[in-house]
């Protein structure tokens, strides 16, 4: 079951991040003039918040089912960064200050990096911690 949730979380992650990267693709390759991408981004922005909340909840369930406990792991680091990303998003939504949007985007990038680390090397944190214990 946790494998299915993992795949669903990746799909949610692509969906929640797609307004940003689709807008960038439109800007870089179509000079902002591709109406199909513009319409897709408008629709995706409407579901950005519910997808983000679903991602936070389902990734927590995924981690618990995979490990049968909540413990420090590459996935838990990615989840914590996801929470930070959500917090910056909420701050931007409530206060409308551009600095919160900037940090929301930066936190999202770190979340992507930690998620890729989790997908490629799920036990990386364990080996790093063992290496530091040997020092």
Image (spheres, rainbow, N blue to C red):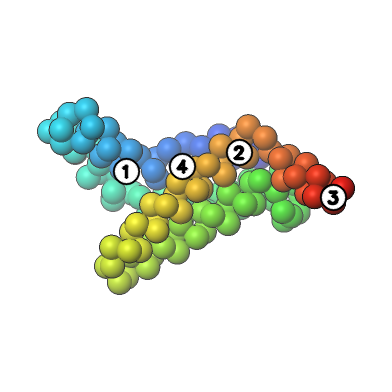
Residue at the extreme right of the image, as rendered: 134
Mark 2 or 4: in front is 2
Q: Judging from the image, what secondary structure is the residue with disc 3 in?
A: loop
Task: Report x, y in % for residue 36.
Answer: 18, 31
Q: Calculate the distance from the C-alpha at mark 2 to the C-alpha at mark 4.
A: 14 Å
Mark 4 or 3: in front is 3
Out of 32 and 4, give the one closest to the viewer.
Answer: 32
Q: Calculate the distance from the C-alpha at mark 3 to the C-alpha at mark 2.
A: 24 Å
Q: Judging from the image, what secondary structure is the residue with disc 4 in?
A: helix
Residue 28 as seen in the image, left or right of residue 48: left
| Residue 122, picture quadrant | top right
Is residue 85 visible from the viewing direction of this image?
yes
Crowding near the residue tagged with mark 4, few <14, some 14–19, many ≥20 C-alpha atoms within 10 Å: many
At 51% from the left edge and 53% from the top edge, which residue is drawn? Answer: 82
Q: Which residue is mark 1?
A: 20
Tags 2 and 1 in contact by the CB under 8 Å rule?
no
Q: Which residue is mark 2?
A: 117
Mark 1 or 4: in front is 1
Q: Which residue is mark 3?
A: 135
At 33% from the left edge and 49% from the top edge, which residue is drawn? Answer: 47
Q: Judging from the image, what secondary structure is the residue with disc 2 in?
A: helix
- Disc ID at residue 3: none
Question: Which mark sits nearer the N-terminus, 3 or 1?
Answer: 1
Q: Judging from the image, what secondary structure is the residue with disc 1 in?
A: helix
Q: Calculate the distance from the C-alpha at mark 3 to the C-alpha at mark 1.
A: 42 Å
- Disc ID at residue 13: 4
Q: Calculate the distance from the C-alpha at mark 4 to the C-alpha at mark 3.
A: 37 Å
- 117 up-or-down from 87: above or below: above
């Amino acid at each position: 079951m946790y494998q299915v949730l993992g795949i669903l979380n990746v799909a949610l992650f692509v969906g929640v991040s797609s307004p940003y990267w689709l807008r960038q693709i439109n800007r870089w390759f179509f000079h902002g003039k591709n109406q199909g991408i513009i319409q897709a981004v408008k629709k995706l922005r409407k579901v950005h918040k519910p997808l983000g909340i679903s991602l936070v909840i389902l990734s927590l369930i995924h981690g618990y089912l995979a490990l049968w406990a909540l413990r420090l792991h590459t996935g838990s680091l990615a989840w914590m960064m996801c929470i930070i990303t959500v917090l910056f998003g909420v701050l931007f939504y409530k206060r409308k200050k551009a600095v919160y949007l900037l940090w929301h985007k930066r936190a999202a990038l770190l979340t992507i990096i930690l998620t890729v680390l989790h997908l490629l090397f799920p036990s990386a944190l364990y080996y790093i911690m063992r290496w530091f214990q040997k020092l």
